[in-house]
Amino acid sequence: MGGKPGRVAVIEQLLADGFTHMFGNPGTVEQGFLDVLSDYPSMKYFLTLQESVAVLVADGYARAARRPALVQLHSSPGLGNGIGALYQAKRGHSPLVVIAGDAGVRYGAMDAQMAADLVGMAQPVTKWATMVQHPSSLLRVLRRAYKVAVTPPMGPVYVCLPQDMLDEPNNEEVRPTSKVSTRVAPDEDTIETIARALVGAKRPVILAGNGVAYAGAESELQQIAESVGAEVYEVDNGEWLMPSDHPLFTGSTGHMFGSYSKPILSRADVVLVVGTYVVPEVFPELGDVFARDARVFHIDLDSWEIAKNHPVELGMVADPKLSLEKLVSALGKAHSSGSKDAAKRRYGEAAEMKSRALAQQLEKDAQSAGNTPMQFHTFAKELAARLPTDAILFDEALTNSPPIQRYRPTRERGQYFLTRGGSLGVGIPGAIGAKVARPDKTVVGFSGDGGSMYTIQALWSAVRHDVDAKFVVCNNRSYRLLQANIQQWWKEQSVTPHGYPLPFDLSWPPLRFDEMAKSMGVPSVRVERPEAIPAAVAQMLDHKGPFLCDVVVEGDVRPDLIGVHCGQ
């Protein structure tokens, strides 16, 4: 019936939608599609050695570039390998378009090798999943997938492209996907109600999530917090929302225990929730998390999240930026001299408390700066002093994250990305993706020893594609977050503390990340003593190309090291 082959039409459609990179791992059922890719040099294929790495590099790219990313997976085994990473992307609302091959629709009844319900496999970890069933709808389905991925609440989508659909002629027109505006204006009466409640509050708290960042409403969030003297907690942390050293920024509610979040929330008399769900934890509180007489307001583009688990006085489906802009103006009108004075007092108290806590922590750091095994703050302090001010950090250090934020506070959008969603192995591929997106910036990825082993082969891809990212492995020879979490379980179950379970230990045989890196062409250095840190940091930052520091740190479990993930 004429027309270009479907495999050609697909590439042209992807180019029309602005994709420049395809992050993937090839397979036999995608061979025809990949065979013609060389005819389109503007589409760069970024080869990874395992599908989870492809997804996580794409996730890092999408977050740093603030645009959708394209992933290619291989049939059922490849999708299976990528599912954990797709869960991470779904929880973080990353706009990924995932395409994957299959032998063909005509083989559907054969229960052949690699046969599986691919759409059924993908559905729990994507916003939308589908398979192209007829060649005449190939591009229509791709455009629909792109639209779904980038429309808030954003998320990964999965499109299975059977080989026989790609081999058939296609006559569809290639054109950019239609965009859907979600700049939904807020209701004026609701905004005024929220403003009056906030200016009259004695203990206001703001819970803000990635929806604020995706809407570009960080400045308005800070203005509102300062206007009413409200503490700001990051929920479902991942994207930067306001300067981490701002007096009113109080960190994360955590994603592990509701028993840590409840004291934060239950003391507030007015709570403003913006762009997040309440509250994302592995072990959430089953009862009320807010005080019974608290006034709770929720603004989000995702109606599913509003009052999903906890009641609110008013919920509003609206664009966070437009809403917070209106709220800034409404607060100015609602304020009295008394409410302004109260807000200034709360601001001052918060500043004093934060300054005092920081001074105490810095003093503790100084006392242990010469210890061997090292505490990670010794390395983090030296690195922060040498980093360019506009460097990008991709942080999967988990229990070693607090020193990174302490010595290198984030003050601008796009400078700091925190792991989210619970999947390990994010730090190294995430940093690679961020560097591909922002080649003009110094990018440093942090990971623990346990997490690094999930995706260590990503280092090979960094060399293959000449990605000048830097990597720091916090090598404490254990799954330390699990050690921290089981302490909480012991407490809840009245179990006498004892030795940690053997599966939490990674000390034998020793994991030598410096040697692993060198085997894949990445120069590296192992840092075991404090006096070796300055030279190692200088060597890493001065090297042109990927470089890894294997930093051997102590493995003790201390509250100051687990607070960022447990809300302490």
Image (cartoon, rainbow, N blue to C red):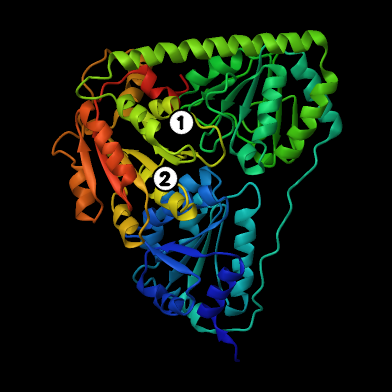
Task: Decide if residue 325 is in sight here.
Answer: yes
- The residue pinned by badge 2 equals 443
Quarter of the view holding residue 49: bottom left
Q: Earlier in the sequence, mark 2 or mark 1?
A: 1
Query: In the image, residue 266 lies at what x, y percent?
Result: 60, 15
**Quadrant of the image occupied by residue 50:** bottom left
Regarding residue 478, the answer to whether it shows in the image is no
Name which quarter of the figure residue 368 lies in: top left
The type of residue carrying mark 2 is: Val
Q: Badge 2, how many Cα within 10 Å: few under 14, some, many 20+?
A: many
Left or right of 13 in this view: 260: left
Q: In which quarter of the image is the N terminus?
A: bottom right
Q: Secondary structure under badge 2?
A: strand
Front label number (2 vs 1): 2
Determine whether 415 is above or below 1 in the image: above
Q: Which mark is residue 282?
A: 1
Which residue: 62% across, 27% down?
207
